[in-house]
Image: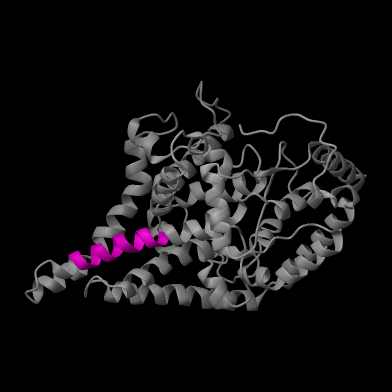
Amino acid sequence: MCRPPLTKENVLKEDEKWIPKFDLAAFTADIHALGKKLEKEQGEDDVRHLRKMVSWSNMCAFVGFITMGLCVNPISVVALSLFTFSRWTMIAHHTCHGGYDKCHPDKNRWTRFKFAIGSLWRRLADWFDWMMPEAWNVEHNNRHHYNLSEKDDPDNVEENNQFLRSLNVPIFVKYMIVGFFMTTWKWFYYSPNTYKELKLARLRRLGKPIPKGVDPATAITMKEVVMGNNSFYSAFEFFSVVVGPYFLIHFFIAPLPYFAIGNYFGMGNTLYQNAIINLFLAEILTNIHGFIAVVTNHAGNDMYRFRDGCRPFSGSFYLRQVLASVDFAMGTDVVDFMHGWLNYQIEHHLWPNLSMLSYQRSAPLVREICKKHGVPYIKENVFIRLKKTVDIMVGASDMKWFPENYEKDFLALDAKMESAKNK
């Protein structure tokens, strides 16, 4: 683990002088109260907004699929890419978190207990991607959100790239490796690692031990799956259950109508081949788009890391979500759609189970609370964040560690506040 040397931790940097004066209890009360208010106000407007975003996503799918056989073209590629991106980052993401559990009238679909899980049909109808929805729910909704920037955070960029950071090669070679990751990361890293987290969760639930010699925090990539260096599942299981259905259906079965149309009109396989090429180009583009919007959320030399875990929705929890997350440009549905609604990362991590519209409404209120309590609230252009993220990946810069003595003091204060609340 990348860990700072043990020091007295009493000397704070200039941008940390707010910490000794920080009132954790008052900050916690303000954030908690705002979250309750936002949750109580959710209703028909949030459902209408979700339907609007679903219609935008579906329109991208319609344009992409209706044009992808005509020729290899940027319109089809961009539309298909946006459909895949928005279906995951906006629609599946917030529904699987329970953002519409209480306000959506259709409880048989738009809840975290139903959406995209339970069968291949539900996965196909609701959210069809490289990741198995049940696996992503464990890895992201539970492990990442409640271990943010800790050792057990499966999405910790600095921790997951220790090999690359320490690799003894010229820096431009490291940037080339990052370029490869940007175009392949969903199937190369995210899909196998989320499935590993699902397997780990099942072992814990059954009370079974983790395989000997295995570090559960170590990421599993496609390389480990193919090479057989994976103690959690076989390559056959992974390809047949997780990535195989998506690969076959999305890239080869879905465009089959173009095969029939092309042969009927004497054009041979040209339309079918065009469709497949457009789908693969869209896959590359949506990986890049997703990398820029997703991976950059919690990485940079201005983002904090933490040594120990904290209780969900405690004062330390709320503080960490702000100090280890960053927002991007925001405020209109078009801007937010292009960011996959991941531009409200601070607000989303404070209250994971709210709707997209609630995050849009809450951002200025959260900024005011942070300003009131002197807590740094970082909002920056996503491409600036991309540069900072890549610098962390290649070892050109390091993330910050929260001062250890204050981390422990805040955890102790959490315990006191919880004890007082339960009396």
Residue 134 in percent (x, y) is at: 49, 49
Residue 117 in percent (x, y) is at: 47, 54
Residue at the image point whose x is 45% and y is 37% from the top? 220
Residue 394 seen in the current view: yes
Reply above or below: 29 against 260: above
Residue at the image point whose x is 47% and y is 52% from the top? 133
User: How does the figure colour the protein chain or chains?
Assistant: one colour
Reply above or below: 273 against 191: below
User: Closest to the observer: 415 or 385?
Assistant: 385
View extreme (top): residue: 212
User: Closest to the observer: 124 or 272?
Assistant: 272
View extreme (front): residue: 170
276 in magenta: yes
In the rendered picture of this protein, how many numbered marks are placed on residues?
A: 0
Q: In which quarter of the image is the N terminus?
A: top right
User: Closest to the observer: 395 or 340?
Assistant: 395
Q: In which quarter of the image is the C terminus?
A: top right
Magenta span dominant secondary structure: helix
Residue at the image point whose x is 36% and y is 68% from the top? 80
- Asked if residue 38 lies left or right of residue 218, the reply is right
Reply above or below: 146 against 43: above
Residue 109 seen in the current view: no
166 in magenta: no
Residue 320 in percent (x, y) is at: 73, 49
Q: Which span is picked out in magenta? A: 273-286
Residue 92 in percent (x, y) is at: 51, 61
